[in-house]
């Protein structure tokens, strides 16, 4: 049984699919949900020009985090599941590290992650937070893959 389910959300379609699966699990098992958004603030320091706007950019990133979490919490609430929310900031490292760290701290019994299911060079170039979570997680990870696009 999974008493505590951690669900990373980023506003994407794949994260929404992961959230839906986590909600189904939470309803069937009476689990607590924690919705997590990772603010990757590296963009605020990407160039000298950006540094002058960094506080404004960080404020915008934080506001976006709150909006993403509020929307995800509302989706869960409408389906009868109470979820708490948390956002964390990372500079540099992958968001996957922050997800695994939150799973340890909370502590989660399961992490449910939406994934694009990229393979080959696209995964190497774009990276994969889901893969990092799977490799590093101290608890089981359920990957919810986006539907394949029709050609």
Image: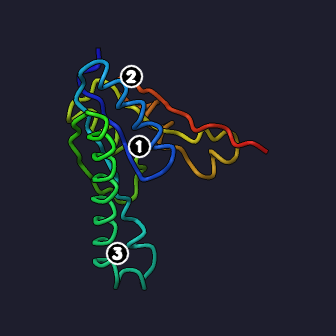
State the SS at label 3: helix
> Dot 2 surroundings within 10 Å: few (below 14), some, or many (20 or more)?
some
> Looking at this rendering, what residue extends furthest in the top direction?
1
Quadrant where the N terminus is found in the figure: top left
Residue depicted at x 26% and y 38%: 34
Determine which of the numbered discs, if any, sits on residue 54 in the image.
none
Q: Earlier in the sequence, mark 1 or mark 3?
A: 3
Judged left or right of residue 116, residue 111 is: left
Determine which of the numbered discs, if any, sits on residue 140 in the image.
2
Q: CA distance from mark 3 to mark 2?
A: 35 Å
Q: Earlier in the sequence, mark 1 or mark 2?
A: 1
Q: Is residue 11 above or below residue 62?
A: above
Quarter of the image for residue 98 reads top left
Q: Which one is closest to the eye, mark 1 or mark 3? A: 3
Q: Nearer the viewer, residue 29 or 1?
A: 29
State the SS at label 2: loop
Quarter of the image for residue 62 reads bottom left
Q: Earlier in the sequence, mark 3 or mark 2?
A: 3
Quarter of the image for residue 96 reads top left
Residue depicted at x 51% and y 43%: 14
Q: What residue did someone put label 3 on?
A: 57
Q: What residue did someone put label 1 on?
A: 96
């Amino acid at each position: 049984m999974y008493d505590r389910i951690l669900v990373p959300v980023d506003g994407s379609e794949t994260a929404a699919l992961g959230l839906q699966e986590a909600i189904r699990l939470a309803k069937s098992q009476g689990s607590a949900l924690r919705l997590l958004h990772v603010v990757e603030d590296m963009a605020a320091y990407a160039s000298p020009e950006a540094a002058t706007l960094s506080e404004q950019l960080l404020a915008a990133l934080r506001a976006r985090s709150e909006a993403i979490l509020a929307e995800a919490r509302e989706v869960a609430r409408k389906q009868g599941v109470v979820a708490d929310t948390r956002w964390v900031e990372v500079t540099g490292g992958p968001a996957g590290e922050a997800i695994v760290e939150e799973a340890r701290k909370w502590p989660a019994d399961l992490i449910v992650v939406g994934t694009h299911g990229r393979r080959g060079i696209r995964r190497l170039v774009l990276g994969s937070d889901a893969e990092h979570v799977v490799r590093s997680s101290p608890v089981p990870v359920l990957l919810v893959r986006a539907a394949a696009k029709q050609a």
